[in-house]
Amino acid sequence: MVAITHKLCAASSIHLVASPPLGAAKTPYRDCSAESSFMMKGRHRGSSLEASPLNRVVLMRGVSRTGLSRRRAACRCCWRSTSSPTLLGMLTLVPLLTAGAQESPCDRGLEALARGPHGYALRGDRCEGIYVQQVGGTVLVVASLTESFEEYDFTSGADLVIEWTAPLDRTVRLRAQGIKRDLYYRMDAVRPPASHSYRWPSDVLAAQHIARGDIGVVGWIRHSLAGVDRDVYLPLRISQHHSRAVAGAYDLVLFPTVALKEVYLTLASVGQNGLPNKTIKHGEPLGYGYYPAERPVKIRLANVGDAGIYYIEIGAELASGGSASLTHWIYYAHGPYPN
C-alpha cells in the first residue's frame, strides 16, 4: 500500500510525496516547472486592485485517488516504482483548472465591504452584488462600452447574454457597475480565450431592482501595444430575449465623480507599431452644456473607420477649476457606418 507523507519544498510550500512499497526500486522524480500563479488586475473608479494567487495543484504519479488532496504548492514531487506494473499503470491527476476558471474574478477589497444576502460575493463563475460604501477612485472612468444593450425584464428570470468580438484570443474580463448615485453594485467575470459570449444570471439585478439604465458594462483583453501591455476594451452586445444585429456604432459611457464644465474627445487609429497614427477627432468638445457629478455622460462613436484598435483620450474641465483626463484603447470591429 502506498503511503502518503508531507515534505517541505525549497519554496516553503507543503506538497505531497508518495513513498514506494517496501522492496521496490525507487526513482525520484521532481518537476517544479509546472509552477504557475496568476494575478488579475481590476479597476473600480480608476483604482488598481490585485487578486491573490491561485491555489496551485499537485500532480501525483502512482498514488491512490483517495490519498490525494489539493494543496497549495510551489512544486510537485513524486516517487516512481520500477518493480510494480500496477503502480506504473496508476496515473492520478488532480484535475487542472481550465484557463477560464483559473483566475478568481473577485475583488478582495469589495468582498470586505459586502453585507447581506446580496452582498458582493462569488456566485458560481462570477462575483456580483452590492457593497456598503463607495471605494476611492479617480475623477473620470469609462463605465460602459456597448454596441447594443437591450432592456431586460426583472420578472422573467431569464439570463442576460453578453456577446463580443475580439481581435485576438485572449482572456476576457467583464465588469458591470452602478452608474447611479449611491448605487454601489458590481459584477466581475473572467472568460477564457476564444470565448465570445457569457450567460449572466439576472437574479441579483432582479433582487435589487437594478434597471438597465442604472449600470454600465465593459469588457476588455490585455494586449501588447508598442511593447506595453494595455487594456483593450471590446464593444459588448447585451440582450435577454432577442439577439441584436451587429450595429457598428458604439455607446461609450463616461462616469464623472465631480461636476464638469466641458468634455473633450480625441480619437485616433493605431498603426502596426502600436502607436496612434491617423487622428479622427482632436480635442472636440461634446457641447452638452451640463455635466453634474455622478451622472453618466453618453458618447456616441459612429462612422469611426476601418476595423482595428483605436486610441481614445477624454479630457475634462472641472466645474471647480482644473482639469482631468484619461486614455483608453478600444477595438472597433466593423467598417464605416453612417451616424
Image (cartoon, helix red, strand yellow):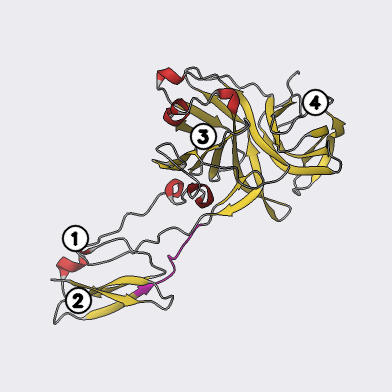
The local secondary structure at tag 4 comes to loop
The Cα–Cα distance between marks 2 and 3, rounded to whole angstroms, is: 47 Å
Q: Indicate the position of residue 161 as horizontal and vertical percent values.
A: 48, 27
Q: Nearer the viewer, residue 88 or 237?
A: 237
Question: Pointer 3 and pointer 4: residues touching (CB < 8 Å)?
Answer: no
Bin the neighbour count of mark 3 within 10 Å (Cα to Cα): few under 14, some 14-19, many 20 and up: some
Residue at image location 59% in from the left, 27% down from the top: 214
**Disc number lying in front (3 or 4):** 4
Quadrant for residue 227, please give it: bottom right
Q: Nearer the viewer, residue 195 or 298?
A: 298
Task: Please give the label number shown on residue 196.
Answer: 3
| In the image, residue 23 above or below residue 38 | below
Q: Based on the picture, tell me whether residue 130 belongs to the magenta stretch.
A: no
The local secondary structure at tag 3 comes to loop
Bin the neighbour count of mark 4 within 10 Å (Cα to Cα): few under 14, some 14-19, many 20 and up: few
Amino acid at pointer 3: His
**Disc number lying in front (1 or 2):** 1
The local secondary structure at tag 1 comes to helix
| In the image, residue 52 above or below residue 185 | below
Mark 1 or mark 3, which is nearer the start of the sequence?
1
The Cα–Cα distance between marks 1 and 2, rounded to whole angstroms, is: 16 Å
The Cα–Cα distance between marks 3 and 4, rounded to whole angstroms, is: 37 Å
**What residue does disc 4 label?**
290
**Disc number lying in front (2 or 4):** 4
**What residue does disc 2 label?**
20
| In the image, residue 266 above or below residue 60 | above
Left or right of 193? Residue 279 is: right
Amino acid at pointer 4: Tyr
Task: Please give the label number shown on residue 66.
Answer: 1
Mark 1 or mark 4, which is nearer the start of the sequence?
1
The Cα–Cα distance between marks 4 and 1, rounded to whole angstroms, is: 66 Å
